[in-house]
Image (tube, helix red, strand yellow):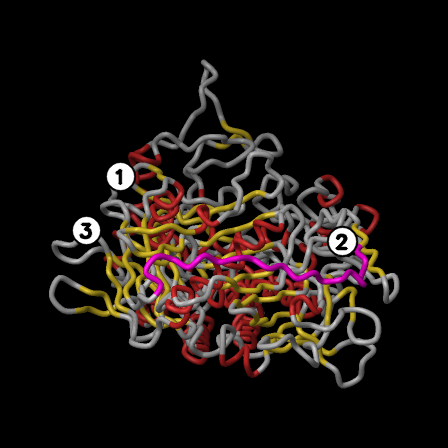
Amino acid sequence: MGRRARIAAACTVAGLVMALSPMPGAAAVTTPRIDLRLLIVDDGGPAVGAIVAELDSTGVPYTRVDLNASGRPTIAAAFLSDTVSGAPRAKFQAVVMPSNAPAGLGADELAALASYEQQFGIRQVDAYTYSQPAVGLDWGAGTTGYAGTLDGTQAQVTAAGTAGPFGYLEGGIAFEDNSPSVPESYGFLAPPLAEQAAGATFTPYVDAPIPGHSGSRGSLVGEYAHDGRSELVVSFVYNAYQRQYRQLARGIVEWATQGVHLGYDRNYFALHVDDVFLSDDRWDTTLKCTPGDVTCPPGSNPDEHPIRMTAADALYLKQWQQAHGFKVDLAWNGAGSEDFKDDNGGTDPLAAQLIADQSSYRWINHTYTHAFLGCVQDVTVVPWRCSTNASGATVWTSQSDITSQITNNRTWAATNGLTAADNTELVTGEHSGLVTNPQQPTDNPYLGPAVNATGTTWLASDASREHDQRAVGNALTIPRYPLNVFYNAATAGEEVDEYNWIYTSRAQGGSGICEDNPATTTCLPTPLDTTTGYGDYIVPLEARLAVNRAISNDPRPHFVHQSNYAEDRIAYPVMEGILNEYDSLFTADTPLVNLRQKDIGTELKRRAAWAHAIANGQVNAYRVGDTVTITAPSGTLAQATVPTGTVQQQLVGTTAFGSAYAGRLSGWAGPGLLQSSVTLKLPSGSAGLLTTVAKVLKTTTTATVRILPVPSGVKTPVPAGPAADSDTLDQTAGGATG
């Protein structure tokens, strides 16, 4: 949205009168069919793009009309509705617009949308528009409002917002201010008009103090009800990744769909702890490397100061989990325990403690010795490369070696009384065997056969290398996010020292990696203080990044290492930061969902099938009164969100549907016995505006709808930038397009 637009603020709002012909049988009361699909009118701006990203993530079908496409369909009555079996059908359950009157839509199209929304009780989201009387607000500039940067603004969900679409939020919404030198958000603040048009109301759902107007608050998100229609007016720009939008995304969809839609949105966080029972190598703060690694000078000894949890650390972890109501997944390597026993009189107190408390955790096979299961590494060069044979072919770790790494770890578990593991789950050492670019651009061809032979069906991968789930033999991958808490650090000082080495320039004493890779790594302006830098900088940053992923409907787990639970126990401040930050944002009925690896894999698999069915036009879903019908391809479960009290209609009787989350029921469902579709019965009284079209069927021959005309020359949906004066708005885009 970097283009400029000048809009005359004093434009006269013209009245637009449109004629509505009475439908046949005007005296009848007919229950319409409402298809569960959204209409997206897209100008290419970040606000509409953010809503589309939410729909894609949560599995909500939509039809997109690109305003910039020359051959786009015309939005007319026939495009929006028709009849099915003699009953009127609304083809879209909600409309998302770039603004209340975007450039690119003609007056006839705006009139058709207004008529359609009136007739079927369809709601419209104005993804980003400026504060103005045409949307029930005073001007967002001059003597009444504000237009400008919103970085750091402390917004609040109003009582109406809490009772309505944003009831899952604790109340506060802090606009991001990640850099004092970069504008990150822009918007308008203004109060509702003191005198609305006849019959119109404006209800703020999210508001904030208006700068320069002591005691006054302006709307950022609110509902404008007028002329038999409802618009959700959003007066700030955003992108799909910004925290303020992520908090509101769920509520925007719930408001638009009136709480009944396909797909669902939950917040997830799971944490895997790798290398349990192993000793991890330690970062050397003098050499600036990890002894044992190929980058360290020859002769450095990795065995001098290994990092390994103690029995006391294990007991602390159990107690911490109980206190915080959170369970981690332990990825174990049995050989680590055997090595410790060999050096310590045949006993391993750590293993004894963890296995005694094994039900407190979830357990994942991490292979017996943590061997690298990809190509055979040639470490005589830096970076390492794949070894080749005399003919130049890559030398791979064999299938038998991979298989033994998996089965030997299971045997160790059985021998030592560890029975809580699920043998379908696997994390290979360093995610090895899978693609490891740039050295190994393909999977080890023996990995698939090995996982097949061992019955492995859920295989962890690195989300920083490959974000999507894929098949490896009979297994599916579960991409995992690494937390930036290093495997070779047990103290805050070690963590900060290594962090400085990676993220500072050579002139600042760092490695210069950040200078060499500016597209992927940002240099710190100055090194972090080794005493305070961990708590003051790394912990809040990692917590913020993890929470942002958690509230993006992303079930993929995160991972750290056992070393982070030893000595200074540096994992805990990050874990507590994540949980505390999340709890400050969401109500108790919107908890973090903590799934084990195979359940995350199942969720991703179901989503992929659902998304494929939607993309291929194989999902047909609609609502008639209090009944929702969903048809999908055989074997594909349907995904839906509905009001509390909804049940699934079976051939005889009903069964429960979904589970409670964020004030709704949501979940997956397939057809019942002898059924070809899923039928959901909504609770009595939930039909709301979708119950009948009697008010249209009984109407007279005309109705009046007031529409703001599209100002001449406007190419962007709304202005974006500081007001030049009270008569004109001359603006440039804010920073929400990144």
Question: Residue 330, can we see it?
Answer: no
Question: Which mark, residue 452?
Answer: 1
Q: Quadrant of residue 259?
A: bottom left
Q: Residue at x 49, y 68 (%)?
A: 255
- Secondary structure beneath dot 2 equals loop
Instruction: Residue 484 in the image: state x and y as whole percent.
Output: 59, 56
User: Would you call the spot at circle 2 few (<14 residues within 10 Å), some (14-19), or many (20 or more)?
Assistant: many
- Does residue 270 lie above or below 171 as drawn? above
Q: Residue at x 51, y 69 (%)?
A: 228
Quote the CA–CA distance across marks 1 and 3.
Answer: 33 Å
Give the dominant element type of the magenta stretch: helix, strand or loop. loop
- Name, please, the residue furthest toward the top: 391
Q: Residue at x 49, y 45 (%)?
A: 467
Q: Which residues are magenta?
A: 7-26
Q: Quadrant of residue 352?
A: bottom left
Left or right position of 474 against 592: left
Q: Earlier in the sequence, mark 2 or mark 3?
A: 3
Q: Which-is-in-front pick, marks 1 and 2?
A: 2
Q: Residue at x 49, y 77 (%)?
A: 164
Which residue matches tag 3? 676
Q: Earlier in the sequence, mark 1 or mark 2?
A: 1
Q: Quadrant of residue 570?
A: bottom right
Residue 17 inside the magenta-drawn segment? yes
Quote the CA–CA distance across marks 1 and 2.
Answer: 53 Å
Question: Which mark, residue 733?
Answer: 2
| Kind of residue sitting beneath label 2 | Ala
- Secondary structure beneath dot 3 equals loop
